[in-house]
Image (cartoon, grey):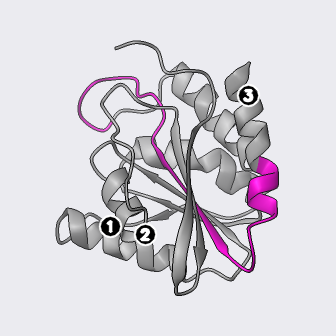
Amino acid sequence: MIRRIVALALVPLLAASPGLAQTVVIVRHAEKAAPSGDPDLSPAGQVRAQALAQALSGGQVVRVLVTPLKRTGQTGQPTAQAAGIEPVAVPFDGGDQAHAGRVADLARAVPVEATVLIVGHSNTVGNIARALGDPAPEAITDCDYDKMTVIHLHGTAPPTVIHTRYGAPTAAC
C-alpha cells in the first residue's frame, strides 16, 4: 500500500517539475523470467511495468530510453504506449561510461518541462544517474526491481535528485 502511495505521489512531482526543468526517471528493468540470456519479463515483471506506467501517467513522458535487451523494452513499453511513443534502444557500444554518456545526452535533448524514462540494468543505472548529475546514485543489486531515481535537470544549476520506489516491494532474494 505504501509503495502505491509513493508511486501516486510521483505524478505531481513529475507534472510540476521545479522551475523550468527536464525530468528524468531512471529504473532498472522489471523482474525477468529467467536468470540468464535475454529473457522476457516474468508475470511479476509485467505487473511492475504496468505500475511504472501508472506512476508516470501524469508526467508528460516524451521519450523512453531502453537497451537492446528485451526486458528493458518490455518494462518501458506500457509507459511508451500510454504516451503514444516508441521506446528508443541505445546500444552498449563503447563500454559502460560511453553508454551512460549517450543515454544522458539523449535525455538532456528533450524539451524543458518534459519527462524521460530510462530503463537500464543493475550495472548501468548508477552510471547513467551519475552522468545526469546524481552525486550519490543508489546501489542496485540483482534483487532490486523497485528502486526509482527522479532527476530534475535545471540547465547549468545542480539537479534535484529524489530516490524512491515504485510498485510492489521487491521479493527477498
Residue 159 visible from this viewpoint:
yes
In the picture as drawn, the residue positioned furthest to the top comes out as: 172
The image position of residue 164, as x and y in percent, is: 57, 40
C-alpha gap between disc 1 and disc 3:
29 Å
Q: Is residue 52 left or right of residue 134?
A: right
Residue 57 visible from this viewpoint:
no
Q: Earlier in the sequence, mark 2 or mark 3?
A: 3
C-alpha gap between disc 2 and disc 3:
27 Å
- Magenta stretch bounds: 11-38
Label number found at residue 100: 1
Label 1 amino acid?
Ala
Q: Nearer the viewer, mark 2 or mark 3?
A: 2
Label 2 secondary element: loop
Q: Residue at x 71, y 37 (%)?
A: 7
Look at mark 2 in the image and give the residue it sits on.
Answer: 133
Is the residue 107 above or below the residue 79 in the image? below
Label 1 secondary element: helix
Quarter that holds the C terminus:
top left
The image position of residue 40, as x and y in percent, is: 43, 33
What crowding class fits label 3: few (fewer than 14 Cα within 10 Å), some (14-19), or many (20 or more)?
Answer: some
In the rendered image, residue 76 lying in the magenta stretch gets the answer no
Q: Earlier in the sequence, mark 1 or mark 3?
A: 3
